[in-house]
Image (tube, rainbow, N blue to C red):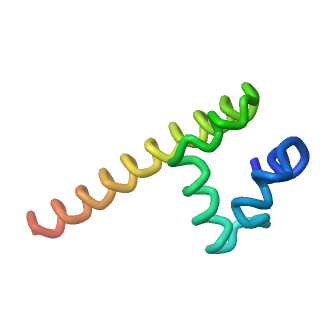
Amino acid sequence: MFHSLAKNHPTMYERIGSPRGFESRATSALFSFLLTRKPESLGDKAMLVRANIMRALLAVYLAGFSLLLYSIVSAHNAA
């Protein structure tokens, strides 16, 4: 995602802080980019598809984490 932004949309890449890799600043910049309407404002269908896939994966990971946390708490309360 970052590479594609840097290559195809350098101004947006710089606006979100020119993130590199999975550092805390890059993660918060990516969340900011994905959870706002910035991908839609680019007018790039390929970038919008990538952003929507990452949004869906984020929802799946959050649901999975919630389910895992619930099962741990439920098992602890049952014991």
Picture residue at 24% right of the left edge, 56% below the top:
71
Q: Residue furthest top?
A: 45
x and y percentages locating residue 77 in the rendered image: 10, 67
Numbered circles on residues, count = 0
x and y percentages locating residue 13 in the rendered image: 78, 55
Picture residue at 51% right of the left edge, 48% below the top:
35
In the image, residue 13 sits, relative to residue 60, either above or below, namely below
Instruction: Answer left or right for 73 relative to 4.
Output: left
Instruction: Answer left or right for 46 relative to 52.
Output: right
x and y percentages locating residue 65 in the rendered image: 38, 55
Depth check: 36 or 69 in front? 36
Depth check: 50 or 41 in front? 41
Instruction: Answer left or right for 63 relative to 53.
Output: left
Picture residue at 73% right of the left edge, 59% below the top:
15
Quadrant including the C terminus: bottom left
Q: Residue furthest bottom?
A: 24
Q: Residue furthest left?
A: 78
In the image, residue 42 sits, relative to residue 66, either above or below, namely above
In the image, residue 45 sits, relative to residue 72, either above or below, namely above
In the image, residue 24 sits, relative to residue 57, either above or below, namely below
x and y percentages locating residue 34 in the rendered image: 57, 47
Picture residue at 68% right of the left edge, 67% below the top:
26
